[in-house]
Image: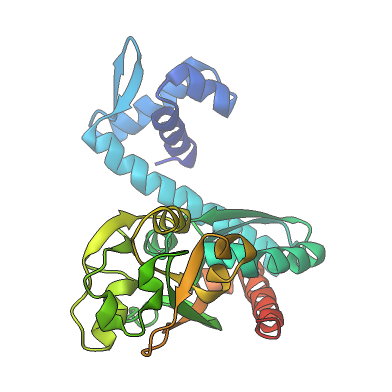
Amino acid sequence: MKLTSLRALITAVEEGSLRAAGKRLRISQPALTKLIRELERELSTTLLVRSTTGVAATAQGRALYERAVAADRELAQAVEQIRQLDGDMTGSLTIGAVPLAVMLLVPETLRTFGREFPGIQLRIYEELYIAQLTRLRKGEVDIALGPLPEHLPPGEFAVETLMPIDMVIVVRKGNPLARARSLAELARAPWVYTGANADSGYARTLFETHGLPPPPAGALVNSTLGLLSIVASGNCVGLLPRQIAVHPFAVQHLQVVAVAEGPLRLSLGALARADAALKPAVRHFMAHLHRAAHHLSNTF
């Protein structure tokens, strides 16, 4: 099974057109068709269904496409790692980060890392940590930045703890719930949950930590911006990192609720796949993250 044939299949599936795929790979459409037919003969199956509107992967084609994408990504990573081990610090680094990390850690890290390694292209994706872990396992990101989850499988990731995070309770400015002094007083209020469902999330963790049943989910969001918007415009309660809650923009619209139980204490950290942590660019980026976190700890 040739790598060129696999790349032809990958491009055809992604483009949905043999002509567009050939153009992207800079080969003729007949040459690309030949590569894919070689794969189909080798596997004795049909990988693509052709129609007047283009091409689409069969179930067999989709299975091979997903494995081929992963294999192509791993080979590219290996080439970069070998070059970097030989002293050629070029290539790319993909970072998945929660909004807090994008807001606080990433700018300083990019400044110092970019100055030392200008040949490394950095890509930053902002998203929830659950989505980051999925992408990290697939090799779609090199490093994930966010609150360190509990019960990580041992040995799967290289883990770097960077700084503590206090998740504080916030409500709309002027909301009567701002006068609450205990979690029990907020138990019946609608809470904004971040995640795929109300069965998880920091609000549930906060209440269960203090022996209380989790509060009702008034809304589910998948972004900090969504949480900010909902809390600032209604009667929902939410949890935000203190650094975001006290940001000049946020304090115009939100108010921190000081309850006796205190904030939910988490640790902001960086995760990399154990094998990817051997890549020099990953190791150097981790070192710059630690420097940025140390600088921040002296600021807040």
Does the rendering let one see residue 273?
Answer: no
Q: Name the residue rendered at 35%, 13% in the picture.
A: 53
Q: Quick one: 183 or 12, which is closer to the camera?
A: 183
- The relative height of residue 1 versus residue 243 in the rendered view (above or below) is above
* Residue 218 in view in this figure: yes
Q: Quadrant of the N terminus?
A: top left
| Percent position of residue 67, x then y | 35, 48
**Quarter of the image holding residue 282?**
bottom right
Colour style of the rendered protein structure: rainbow
Left or right: where 217 falls relative to 19: left
Q: Is residue 44 above or below residue 286?
A: above
User: Which residue is most to the top?
Assistant: 52
The foreground one among 6 and 282 is: 282
**Quadrant housing the C terminus:** bottom right
Nearer-the-camera pick, 154 or 128:
128
Q: Position of residue 172 (x, y in %)?
A: 43, 62
Q: Residue furthest right?
A: 115
Residue 7 in the image, given as x and y percentages of width and height: 47, 37
Q: Quadrant of residue 259?
A: bottom left
Furthest-left residue in this view: 213
Taking the spot 21% from the left edge, 88% from the top edge, the residue there is: 211
Number of on-image labels = 0
- From this view, report whether residue 133 is shown above or below residue 184: above
The spot of residue 8 in percent (x, y) is 46, 31
Left or right side of 116 for 251:
left
